[in-house]
Image: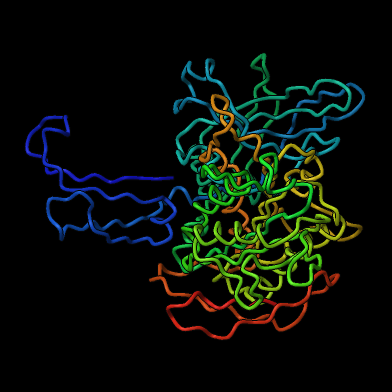
Amino acid sequence: SQVMFCLYDIDSHSTQLSDHDFLGQFESTIGELVSRRRVEAPLAKSPRRDSTIIITCIELQHCKEILQMQLCGSQLDKKDFLGKSDPYFEVSKPLTPVVDSSSSDLLRAQWTLVYRSAVVRKNLNPTWQPTQLKLSQMCNGNKSLILRWDCIDWNKRMKHSHIGTFYASVADILREYENSNSRGATSGAGARFQLLSRRKKPAGYLVFNRLELLIEDSFVDYIQGGCELLFTVGIDFTASNGNPATPQSLHYIDPSGRLNQYELAITSVGEIVQDYDFRRAFPSFGFGARVPPRGDVNHCFPLTFNDSNPYCAGLAGLLQAYRSCLRSVTLYGPTNFSPIIRHVMQLAQANQSGKQYFVLLIITDGIITDFYETKLSIIEASRLPMSIIIVGVGREDFSAMEELDADNKRLQIGGMIAEADIVQFVPLRDFFRADNPNELSKSALTKAVLEELPDQLCQWMRKRGIKAGPPVERSQPVLQQPQQQLVGPPAFDPMLAAPMLNASAPPPYYGP
């Protein structure tokens, strides 16, 4: 997101900026400010040539707070006629702030679900699994915000039955938990809150028997602590895109300068990610085309046609390489993802210190041909510091992609289960403006594409006990060359590692 700072010399109590002296302005992006932490830059349009602005970006503490808790039920009402209840609980927050549990505002409030627990079968004194909730999501970072806690009886064939409800803020719960400990309560007694049925009758208790407020390193902490996002692009050059010489093709280069769907996806996503990739040089590959000089089908060829240096200088260089490549290759097929995924996996395998995190953007128009191999690659990649963003262009049926974007269920092949969800799939067609079908809503697209990336990075770091370092001055990190080939089907010829280049040249590419 773009942000502009305008500086004025205030000379009076007037609220009109035009009544004050304009000193200059500075325009940047949120990504650049976050990643660099401290920015010193000249002011534009300033009456003085030597005017500068210094901006320091610091994340608010409450954005990093996490509530770790374990709840149990006590003496819950029995709702099943022939057996015990099957209880679960939900946490909801109000759409408009409510900070007084006795307020009539609770009755008028509209609620949105924050968390739903698993069901514990046939138990009136259940203990649910521990969970962690971010305060930024749970209560918008406001510990005084009143939350609604519902206990519900799950039913297989009928509507679920309400057991009881209580209202309490995070501050209320923390205070009661602390008081229970200070009173010398027996171990495990915790903070008890009485549930009331819809008829205001006692319906048992929800008990917080474990509760801790944690502060964990955030995405901003890792980026400012020296972690760099390394952005790789994979572009679909299969024949299903259509003849690039015709306007109907998804690869058609419009002489008027209007971007095609591949170019829109590259620029929209790249404009955000490039702020976190301090090299601003992107290794970029194509797949599914016949490549010169012999015309062999290749599923992981550099757009530069230089195996030892597939880097493109910034987004402008990437677009230029893409357009030049279109004039040199023959669109063919099939649509294989696994070669380029395994290519990035080898880099991620060799760089697991937490200083680099790899982001692979795949732009495609069709259904994956090597679906099994792609699933297997993603499952293996889920243990590495990498995320995969798939942008679908055109009007094809992308329903199979939803399986790869495993938001609700981890990817699995036999006994192999993905460690985490590392794939985000976005169909580009969903982001064209309703009032102008030829114009893309870039802000909505970038939000959807990058929505899961911060959590994916943080999750990988935390599972390996990697803490964010202190804020650092940026220097170009050095990647280590992979020492061995990853297990998996050989899908492309290994690329040679580039020799060290001078400081003014693009950074070397250490491919497998």
Q: Is residue 425 above or below residue 217?
A: above
In the image, residue 508 sits, relative to residue 357, either above or below, namely: below
Q: Position of residue 453 (x, y in %)?
A: 60, 53
Residue extending farthest to the bottom is 499
Residue 53 sits in which quadrant? bottom left
Nearer the observer, 243 or 337:
243
Q: Residue furthest left?
A: 11
- Classify the position of the C terminus by image quarter: bottom right
Question: Where is residue 19 shown, x and y percent of the image?
Answer: 11, 33
Q: Which residue is located at x 11 percent, y 37 percent?
A: 20
| Whole-percent x, y for residue 501 in the image | 51, 83
Above or below, 402 relative to 466? above
Locate residue 341 relative to residue 58 in the image: left or right.
Answer: right
Q: Nearer the viewer, residue 444 or 266?
A: 266
Viewer-closest of 266 and 81: 266
Q: Position of residue 167 (x, y in %)?
A: 56, 28
Res 222 visible: no
Question: Would you identify the image quadrant in which residue 22 lies?
Answer: top left
Q: Residue at x 77, y 78 (%)?
A: 485
Q: Quadrant of residue 160?
A: top right
In the rendered view, does 151 fall on the left or right side of 275?
right
Check the image and report above or below for 9 versus 389.
above
| Colouring rule applied to residues | rainbow
Q: Nearer the viewer, residue 157 or 453?
A: 453
Q: How many marks?
A: 0
Judge whether residue 303 can be spotted in this image.
yes
Image quadrant where one finds the N terminus: top left
